[in-house]
Amino acid sequence: MTTIDFNAQRLDHAKKIVSKIKLPAQPTIVIEINKEMRAEHPHFERIGNLVTQDASISAKVINVINSPFFGLARKCESIVQALTYMGLENFKKVVLTACLQDALGTGSAGDKIFWDHSLHTAVAAEALAKSMRGVLSADEITPDMAYMTGLFHDCAIPMLLKRSPEYSAFIDAALSHKRDIIQEEDALVGSDHCVVGGLMAKTWSLPDAVCKTIIHHHTSDLAGLGPVPAKLIALTKIADYIAYTFGFSIGMVDQIIEGEWDQEEWCELNESVLH
């Protein structure tokens, strides 16, 4: 069976599972902001009003902006301040993050592990993309794409956990890439977090390259995926490992201080990624 056939089969199977999970729809606020951003002269006040009209999202946006991830010199007290400090592109990224948090939940201890992992991976991916613009720009891979990939790459994990509590046994392995758990996930829930996450990203109208990267982000064989997904997968894997080394990719079972995922081992398993 070819890789294309295998992926098509996985996608078809995942769509059936997803129909039972009911993926969160792309929020109207994200659709409207994207529409405004595509205008020749985006309107700050209109974008600000779109956010402030939704009290829940507005509060989450302020929380995200004031978190250590964005490192602002002083706290933002309002959406208008946030827009002024951050500019439209960064503000859009924060709204996307807040909307994803709103859709997936942030209340439990497991949610905290997931969000620490996702946000640190997203920020590391964006930083790597900025430092490698010369290498990535030829393939039109932007820091914004890198951030979105890092943020969404494991977004299916909390959804699968809600559908099947038994999935909790996979969380540490899924977040740390410690082993290939795709077949094990398939056996338990009928699909895997990579494919379901890619479908979620597609539902939210993320770029095709980002969706494809999410679907393949656990693969070690990058051949045949095309230069854009291959480079974006490699960047995401390295960002994920950077987050791991700071203790933000895993739960209590698989801790780097126990030497279970050391640098030499990681580099050996990810030789093609580093190349």
Image: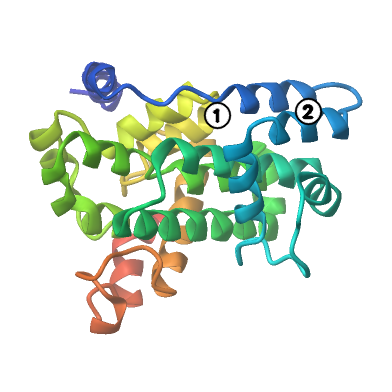
**CA neighbours of label 2 inside 10 A, class few (<14), some (14 to 19), many (20+):** some
Does the image show residue 148? yes
SS of the residue under disc 2: helix
As drawn, is 257 to the left or to the right of 40?
A: left
Q: Is residue 275 visible?
A: no
Q: Which residue is mark 1?
A: 206
Q: Nearer the viewer, residue 32 or 195?
A: 32
- Residue at the spot 23% in from the left edge and 70% down from the top edge: 254
Give the mark nearest the N terminus, 2 or 1: 2
Say above or below: 231 vs 53.
below
The residue positioned 83% from the left and 51% from the top of the image is 81
Tag 1 secondary structure: loop
Find residue 274 and report its horizontal and vertical position in percent.
Answer: 45, 60
Kindly identify which numbered label has been placed on residue 37: 2
Q: Position of residue 116 (x, y in %)?
A: 44, 60
Residue most extreme to the left? 187
Q: Quadrant of the N terminus?
A: top left
Q: Nearer the viewer, residue 185 or 219?
A: 185
